Amino acid sequence: MRKSLAKPVWIDRFILVGAGLFTFALVVSAIFDPTIRILHAFQKLIYIAVIVLTRIAVIAGGGHFLLIVGCLAGFLRTRPDVRRWSEFVAGGLVAVVYLAAIIVTTGPQYINLLKRVFRL
């Protein structure tokens, strides 16, 4: 009989608690030293990424993260006005809707994952 390849629950709990404790430490230190608040806000993004990436395919998640950062950096270099920001956000929403549509129509086995991601 083949063993289940499902990840044990304790692994997710350790990651969540570890990231949460470190985030708490960042908040406490930022309270006592306001000069590092921006640094700690950006540092917290690392722990959010760790939590997210440990719950999906790591390579795909990393690729998407890099793609989003690259697109955002390139977009910000254009010094966008309000209209361009609207187009940028609308394009992102269209991409998410497209992804949901192709999952529903061609990959029904992933519908439950899609529901979990969007908390539906």
Image (cartoon, grey):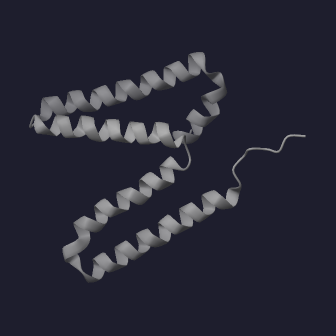
* Quadrant occupied by the C terminus: top right
Question: Residue 98 vs residue 32: left or right?
Answer: right
- Res 34 → quadrant: bottom left
* Quadrant occupied by the N terminus: top right
Residue at the location (29% across, 60% down)? 42
Number of marks present in the image shown: 0
- Res 79 → quadrant: top left
Name above or below for residue 51 compared with residue 35. Answer: above
- Res 78 → quadrant: top left
Residue at the location (68% across, 61% down)? 10
Name above or below for residue 5 compared with residue 84. Answer: below
* Near-viewer residue (43 or 86): 43
Residue at the location (14% across, 29% down)? 83
Can you give x and y, in whole percent of width and height, for residue 17 in the image?
55, 67
* Near-viewer residue (50 or 116): 50
Can you give x and y, in whole percent of width and height, for residue 117 in the image?
53, 40
